[in-house]
């Protein structure tokens, strides 16, 4: 996989985690940098692992859809991207009604919720036959970094940022899906 495509996927996947990290940064009572480290570790770990799980599960089904694999990758990436944009459009305002965003349980729930997309992308990556250790590591590190930054930004600028990051992440994933489709068609 080309380094530019890999970074675009990693950044696109990290946008959900970044957005949640911004809100968590806004809502947390913990010290900013300790909490940023904790959120980054949780979100990065789950994002990397869900990518691997999606990748491995795709091999079980690979023989069933080898002739349409590029369409599957396109539909998954574009679908995730469209869903991210739709969610961003329908989100009205940031709310800190969530109780105890600092707890282990809350961080696991946020980590799972923001890494579901990584599972689907992992399936797409299996179709492309990439080195999953490198790809999942880049995704995990990128998610860690953006989540860390997200908490710090959220603590400082949370209400001004809103949901713009989900628009950007969704658009990136749609563009990558189109790129995969056009490469296989031509």
Image: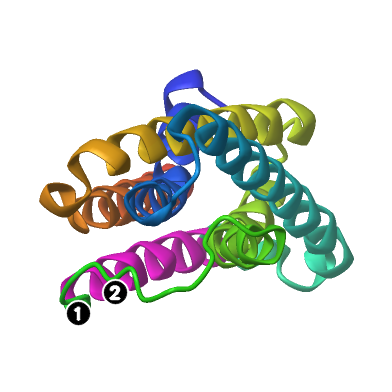
Q: Which residues are magenta?
A: 71-89
Q: Residue at x 22, y 48 (%)?
A: 158
Residue 4 is left or right of residue 128, and the answer is left
| Location of residue 108 in the rendering, given as x and y in whole percent from the top left corner | 68, 61
Q: What secondary structure is the stretch in magenta mostly built from?
A: helix
Give the residue number, with chain letter if any, for mark 2: 87
The reply, left or right, for residue 87 in relation to residue 183 is: left
CA gap, disc 2 and disc 1:
5 Å
Q: Quick check: marks 2 and 1 in contact, CB under 8 Å?
A: yes
The answer to which quarter of the image holds residue 104 is bottom right
Magenta stretch: includes residue 96: no
Q: Residue at x 84, y 54 (%)?
A: 56
Q: Which residue is mark 1?
A: 90
Q: Which mark is residue 6?
A: none
Taking 111 as reference, is 88 above or below it? below
Can residue 37 be seen from the camera position used here?
yes
In which quarter of the view is residue 11 placed?
top left
Residue 28 spot, x, y in % from top left: 43, 52
165 is higher (above) or lower (below) than 113: above
Q: Residue at 43% x, 66% y: name it.
A: 80
Q: Where 125 sits versus 69, above or below?
A: above
Rate crowding at label 1 as few (under 14), some (14 to 19) or many (20 or more) other CA atoms within 10 Å. few
Locate the N terminus by quadrant. Answer: top right
Q: Nearer the viewer, residue 140 or 20?
A: 20
Provide the secondary structure element on which disc 2 rests: helix
Q: Secondary structure at mark 1?
A: helix
Q: Is residue 116 left or right of residue 160?
A: right
């Amino acid at each position: 996989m080309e380094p530019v495509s890999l970074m675009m996927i990693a950044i696109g996947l990290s946008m959900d985690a970044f957005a949640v990290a911004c809100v968590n940064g806004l809502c947390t009572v913990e010290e900013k940098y300790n909490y940023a480290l904790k959120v980054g570790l949780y979100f990065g770990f789950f994002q990397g692992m869900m990518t691997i799980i999606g990748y491995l599960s795709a091999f079980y089904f690979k023989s069933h859809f080898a002739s349409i694999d590029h369409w599957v990758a396109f539909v998954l990436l574009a679908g995730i991207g469209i869903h991210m944009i739709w969610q961003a459009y329908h989100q009205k305002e940031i709310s800190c009604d969530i109780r105890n965003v600092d707890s282990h349980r809350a961080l696991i729930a946020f980590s799972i919720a923001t890494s579901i997309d990584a599972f689907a992308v992992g399936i797409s990556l299996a179709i492309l036959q990439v080195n999953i250790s490198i790809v999942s590591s880049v995704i995990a590190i990128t998610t860690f970094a953006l989540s860390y930054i997200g908490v710090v930004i959220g603590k400082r600028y949370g209400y001004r940022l809103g949901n713009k990051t989900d628009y950007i992440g969704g658009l990136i994933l749609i563009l990558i899906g189109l790129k995969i489709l056009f490469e296989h068609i031509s």
